[in-house]
Amino acid sequence: MTRRPIMAMVAIAAVSSIALTACGSSSGSDGDNSDGGSKGPIRIMTMYTDTPALSNKEIASNVKAAAKQVNDAGGINGRKLEVLTCNNQLDPNVHLTCIRTAIDKKVSAVVGSVSFFPTVYPALEKAGISFLGGFGIQKEELNSPISFPVSAGEPGWYYAQAKQLADLGMKNPAWIQCEPAACKFGEEIFRAAWKKYTGGKLGKVITIPDKATDLSTYAADLLSSGVDSIATGMYVSENQQLTKELRTGGFKGPIAVNGPNMTTEALKELGSNLGDFYVSGGMLPPSAQNIAAVPAMAEWHKAIEAFAPGLPASELALNGWASTKVFIDVAKKVKDVNSTTMLKALNGTKPDNPVITGIAPPFSAVQGTPPLPEFKRLGTLMVSIAKADASGALVQDKPGSFLDLSK
């Protein structure tokens, strides 16, 4: 998630009109009957955020690129896949307006989206619309009957970071997080993971306000505190700035971040300031190593470079692509695709016949006991961990590999 230079947030008035202006479509079809028959377009929506504080527009581009790929090949059983996009503006009211637009437009699912506020799930539950490929950044999302994570999401990120630091022998990590409630949920998960892997308690915790533009005082606090490692749940530019401040200040310990909040471009910019730097995620890292070694990664890279060259490459981007690929795979097996049939079909996916994207872990709806019982809709704790080299390139010990933290 890219954090831009902070500007004063303007109060939102006439929320409905703002959000509807932010919502768009990737095709020129009209009418609201996408789920009413077997010949019209199949509609999905993806939500992204584009504000002065935070931008992840690459989500929508990757969903559209996957839709273009299937449409160029004849569509889903002859039907075109139409993508509605909506900028949720990091505002709870606009979030809800995006969802109401999805309901009004009769989408078959909301796909590959980031949602920061829990009120969207009751609305989708009432409408019977699947939320496919969220990041699991709220308890409500991880327990809603319409939620279908395609990766380990936020629990996976922070369990992986805790395990990585524990395996390196760290004893006193600091946890640094962004300001929204979803970030504080990350702290809760990291604390539980740290206790699991070390038996110890998390010590220093710092919350970076969204309005902060200079992180030098936070870095100075960390440098004087005696912590031996850093785990973060922050935006991309905050991770960049804090890492640079710490390294130039002499901090030698490992730094662990999550895949959505670190792009390949940001890693290259840090270069020699990276030091001992790890990136964990629920998708394979979008690295040159994996693009060369994993056919599904090469397919993604070719498609997104043709559709929108130069976009940030991160887990956010890959999640949009992989979630849409899951939707397409399941939809091809459904006679008449609509929200009702897709919800049933997604719930019918089973571990013995999962959807394979080659980028995310094998997908199926939660069956039996979930890997973290408190999160009923979380189907996997398979994660990837990569280390950045001095050039900023992410490297896995084994390209294209996942580590199953449920075992």
Image (cartoon, grey):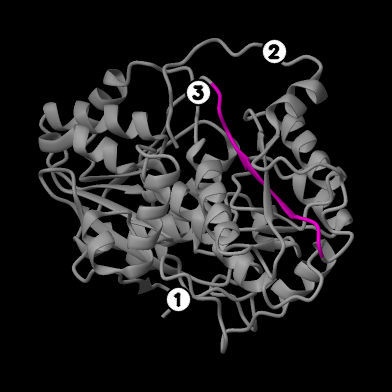
Q: Which residue is drawn at 81% across and 62% down?
A: 39
- Residue 214 vs 257, above or below: the answer is above
Amino acid type, callout 2: Ala
Which image quadrant: the N terminus? top left
Position of residue 198 in the picture relative to residue 169 (left or right): right
- Residue 353 vs 60, above or below: the answer is below
**Numbered circle sitting on residue 406:** 1
Which of pointers 1 and 2 lies earlier in the amino acid sequence? 2
**Residue 203: quarter of image:** top left
Distance from Cα at disc 3 to Cα at disc 1? 35 Å
The residue stretch that appears in magenta? 39-51
Q: Where is residue 129 in the image (x, y as percent from the top left)?
A: 79, 57
Which image quadrant: the C terminus? bottom left
Q: Mark 3 points at which residue?
A: 53
Q: State yes or no: residue 44 in magenta.
A: yes
Q: Can residue 358 be seen in this view?
A: yes
Q: Which of marks 3 and 1 is in front?
A: 3
Q: State yes or no: residue 379 in magenta.
A: no
Amino acid type, callout 1: Ser
Distance from Cα at disc 1 to Cα at disc 2? 44 Å
Position of residue 120 in the picture relative to residue 128 (left or right): left
Which of pointers 3 and 2 lies earlier in the amino acid sequence? 2
Label 3: which secondary element? loop
Foreground residue among 388 and 399: 399
Mark 1, Cα crowd under 10 Å, few <14 / some 14-19 / many 20+, is few
Q: Residue at x 87, y 54 (%)?
A: 127
Q: Where is residue 50 in the image (x, y as percent from the top left)?
A: 55, 28
Q: Name the residue under label 2.
A: 11
Q: Which residue is drawn at 76% across and 55% down?
A: 41
Q: Residue furthest bottom?
A: 352
Q: Where is residue 295 in the image (x, y as percent from the top left)?
A: 33, 69
